[in-house]
């Protein structure tokens, strides 16, 4: 089994037909691993991602794909910490891999080996399907001798368990679906649907490309009024920006189902649902409701209407996605379990992957500009530990040494940069101005900056 990686949109586009074929073959695949969703999501990330590709060595055919992304954060010391995430994190309700089923036994060890060889301190497998045995096999490839492994809990202050996904199996007719519900719920949904079918003042419409922004803005405003005080303004704004992008991409791809409920011309609620015709699944993603509306439950009405519509289209599942909120359970779903697993290296050399070096340079330079010299020196040194011949970082580190009175270290750092770009006049001027003392200090000693083996 041969595992390679891609990290550009051009390479990603070339995979479309093979990705789609593999997606159709994998019974565990879901909307958030479809080519259309993942392509738009990865392009929006603007770097820092890669897709591991497993090929059968016999014929070179792709048999598995694992989208990943790197996240970089700065420690108080100024050193950087790298987490390897499933690529869909912070946007997708499910994450994971896609694989040809008969190749699983060979694919999993090969992917695990490729992951171990990447540069990271922490590996987060968030929102993977607990019922899919491939992930347990993958995680078993990370030995307890070298890695620590912990499972996460995702229960919020409302006691909603976000590791549970209520999924309604859709029968052949809507009446059959109603027959699976309690008598009270059955009567309630029939009454709600009659108001829609019998009253001209109650309508369901759908946005077009021209009206999408206005419709989304109204639903987002409803959502903001309900949730922003609990989630905080900054996080809420980030969620709504991300959801807008995901929803617009679905509209453009033809996979968006967005029923909007109006009463006397007033928008009172709407749903955002993503359709997956390959899996036969409708994935409810987001809702917005005017909390001042005092009429019969618009949320239950919209879900009942959507389920009826999906049954008429021969869809097989209505997935409420993450969260076991009580209203979802009224529709008689089964609960699918997700899991979040964190793997940490017991020892790390601190080497940074190529994908995060530019971001690390920005962060170290920002610390430098704020006169946080020890933190900047630690960041610069770690970058050079990972990419020793990065001229601009050598130059900035030389400047830092000058600013902090370490002229000998500055000279040696500029000299190394000058060896790489011998015609650079700015470096020549710096070296001419600085006169090395008889006893020079190695750059790694200045400001107690860590050496290559510090971690």
Image (spheres, rainbow, N blue to C red):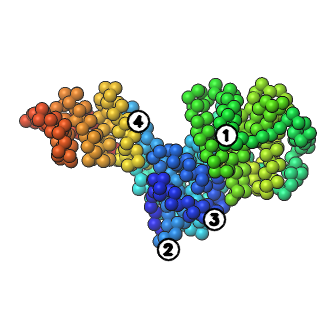
* Residue that badge 4 annotates: 74
* Residue that badge 1 annotates: 210
Comparing marks 2 and 4, which lies closer to the viewer? Answer: 2
Q: Is residue 117 left or right of residue 20?
A: left
Is there CB contact under 8 Å for labels 2 and 4?
A: no
Relative to 224, is 204 above or below?
below
Asked whether the viewer can see residue 382, the reply is yes
How far apart are labels 3 and 4 at the CA level?
41 Å
Residue 241 in picture, x, y percent from top left: 58, 36
- Mark 2 and mark 1 lie on one chain; the one further toward the N terminus is 2
Q: Give the secondary structure at mark 1.
A: loop
- Mark 3 and mark 4 lie on one chain; the one further toward the N terminus is 3
Residue 226 in picture, x, y percent from top left: 69, 28
Residue at the image point whose x is 58% and y is 27% from the top = 233
Q: Is residue 211 left or right of residue 413?
A: right
* Residue that badge 3 annotates: 25
Say which quarter of the image contains residue 323. Answer: top right
Residue at the image point whose x is 16% and y is 35% from the top = 430
Relative to 61, is 20 above or below?
above
Q: Give the secondary structure at mark 2.
A: loop
How far apart are labels 1 and 3 at the CA level?
36 Å
Q: Which mark is residue 59?
A: 2
Residue at the image point whose x is 24% and y is 38% from the top = 395
How far apart are labels 2 and 4 at the CA level?
44 Å
Q: Is residue 151 left or right of residue 214?
A: left
Relative to 179, is 210 above or below?
above
Q: How many marks?
A: 4
Residue 308 in picture, x, y percent from top left: 83, 49
Residue 327 in picture, x, y percent from top left: 78, 38
Q: Give the secondary structure at mark 3.
A: helix
Of residues 202 and 142, which is closer to you in this image? Answer: 202
- Mark 4 and mark 1 lie on one chain; the one further toward the N terminus is 4
């Amino acid at each position: 089994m041969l595992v390679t990686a891609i990290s550009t949109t051009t390479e990603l586009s070339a995979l479309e037909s093979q990705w789609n074929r593999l997606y159709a073959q994998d019974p565990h695949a879901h909307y958030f691993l479809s080519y259309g969703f993942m392509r738009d999501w990865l392009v929006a990330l603007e770097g820092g991602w890669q897709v591991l590709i497993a090929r059968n060595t016999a014929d070179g055919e792709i048999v598995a794909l694992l989208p990943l992304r790197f996240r970089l954060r700065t420690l108080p010391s100024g050193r950087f910490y790298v987490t390897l995430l499933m690529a869909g994190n912070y946007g997708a309700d499910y994450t994971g891999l896609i694989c040809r089923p008969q190749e699983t036994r060979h694919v999993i060890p090969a992917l695990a080996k490729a992951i171990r060889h990447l540069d990271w301190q922490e590996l987060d497998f968030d929102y993977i399907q607990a019922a899919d045995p491939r992930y347990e096999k993958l995680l078993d490839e990370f030995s307890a001798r070298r890695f620590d492994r912990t499972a996460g809990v995702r229960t919020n202050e409302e006691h909603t368990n976000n590791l549970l996904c209520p999924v309604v199996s859709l029968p052949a007719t809507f009446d059959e679906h109603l027959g699976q519900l309690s008598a009270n719920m059955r009567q309630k949904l029939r009454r709600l649907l009659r108001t829609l079918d019998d009253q001209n003042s109650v309508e369901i419409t759908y946005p077009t490309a021209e009206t999408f922004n206005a419709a989304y803005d109204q639903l987002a405003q409803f959502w903001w009024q309900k949730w922003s005080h609990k989630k905080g303004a900054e996080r809420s704004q980030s969620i709504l920006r991300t959801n807008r992008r995901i929803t617009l991409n679905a509209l453009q791809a033809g996979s968006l189902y967005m029923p909007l409920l109006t009463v006397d011309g007033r928008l009172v609620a709407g749903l955002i649902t993503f359709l997956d015709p390959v899996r036969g699944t409708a994935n409810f993603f987001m809702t917005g409701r005017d909390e001042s509306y005092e009429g019969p439950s618009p949320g239950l009405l919209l879900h009942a209407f959507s389920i009826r519509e999906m049954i008429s289209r021969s869809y097989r599942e209505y997935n409420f996605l993450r969260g076991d909120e009580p209203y979802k359970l009224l529709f008689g779903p089964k609960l699918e379990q997700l899991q979040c697993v964190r793997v940490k290296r017991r020892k790390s050399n601190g080497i940074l992957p190529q994908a995060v070096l530019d971001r690390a340079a920005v962060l170290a330079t920002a610390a430098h500009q704020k006169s946080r010299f020890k933190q900047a020196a630690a960041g610069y040194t770690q970058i050079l530990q990972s990419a020793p011949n990065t001229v601009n970082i050598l130059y900035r580190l030389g400047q830092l040494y000058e600013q902090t009175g370490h002229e000998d270290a500055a000279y040696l750092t500029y000299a190394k940069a000058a060896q790489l770009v011998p015609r650079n006049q700015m470096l020549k001027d710096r070296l001419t101005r600085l006169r090395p003392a008889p006893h020079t200090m190695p750059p790694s000693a200045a400001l107690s900056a860590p050496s290559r083996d510090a971690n």
